[in-house]
Amino acid sequence: MTKQKIRRDENFPVGSLLIPRRLRATVHAYYRFARLADDIADSPDLTPETKKDRLFAMKSALARAELKDSENSEEMAAALSLGNHLTQRGLELSLASGLLEAFLWDADNNPCRTWADLINYCQYSACPVGRFLLALHEEKNGVPESDALCCALQALNHVQDSSKDWQTLQRVYIPTDWIGGAGETIDGLGRETISPEMRTVLDRVLDNTDALIASASNLPNLIHHRGLAAEATICVALAKRLSRRLRRNNPISNTVSLTPLDWAYAVTRGLIRLLRL
């Protein structure tokens, strides 16, 4: 449920074996579409204008039954394929086109100035993924909880990659008003060591993220499909583990990631959920 990362180095399961075989092709088409659009937004070789042109073209291709002769590219084919998958299953195209709003934001390198900006970004970059999975499984409940979980997962990845995002892409997802209010500057994201001020800012992001995780904790209980409920259980468990690791370690100068033990714990929780239903 969630550069060159859906998103961000696959911290969380996407299209796992818990998804029914009959639905996996649609999940993979969704993932491929998101991945290619993300690659456009993150390309160091494209201008913002070119990125936006190509993203808008993908949005247009979503709604068409076939491509024009001039649109023979992998990204356009992926958009057409996903559009067909969604249409055939009676799903809203906005479940995919919403993602493009986040990539368009990235193309302009807009910073997140406030926590509200970050959540607004997550509403496009992450929430459509959870909503897509719920709709694909014909689940009627759990949208607010799914949104909370998806926002939490995305926020955790932003903390995890905060230094990399700044140094390689000049992107800032950590609220800049919190950074300034703590007496730090954005350059603090690129230093070799983390300052006490930046540590305070990241912990504030994690405090808010933990509140989102708490709001999402009941999601597995609202899902009827056993496999999807188990996957939601795994994601909630992984989010809690990653949040704790990011608090205890320094993501500015070190790579902080989930361990095999974290995965084993979360998968065990998911299997218990699967067997209990």
Image (spheres, grey):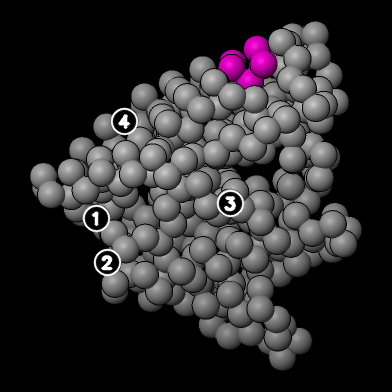
Residue that carries the numbered disc 4 in the rendered image:
217
Taking the magenta stretch, the answer to whether it contains residue 200 is yes
Q: Who comes first in sequence, dot 3 or dot 2?
A: 3
Does residue 126 sit above or below 191 in this rendering?
below
Q: Are marks 3 and 4 in contact (CB under 8 Å)?
A: no
Please state the extent of the stretch shown in magenta in the rendering.
199-204
Q: Is residue 130 above or below residue 211?
A: below
**Real-space Cα distance between discs 1 and 3?**
23 Å
Main SS of the magenta segment?
Answer: helix
Q: Are marks 1 and 2 in contact (CB under 8 Å)?
A: yes
Q: Position of residue 277 (x, y in %)?
A: 11, 47
Q: Horizontal placement of 242 versus 274: left or right?
A: right
Q: Which mark is residue 227?
A: 1
Is residue 239 on the magenta stretch? no
| Local SS, label 2 | loop
Q: Amino acid at mark 2?
A: Pro
Q: Quadrant of residue 79?
A: bottom right
Residue 127 % position (x, y):
48, 44
Observer-side mark, 1 or 3, equals: 3
Asked which quadrant contains residue 161, the reply is: top right
Give the numbered dot on residue 9: 3
Residue 95 in the image: above or below residue 36: above
Q: Which residue is mark 2?
A: 20
Separation of marks 1 and 2 at Cα, in angstroms: 8 Å
Query: For the residue marked with disc 3, what is the amino acid?
Result: Asp
Q: Secondary structure at mark 3?
A: loop
**Residue 19 at what x, y percent from top left?**
31, 62
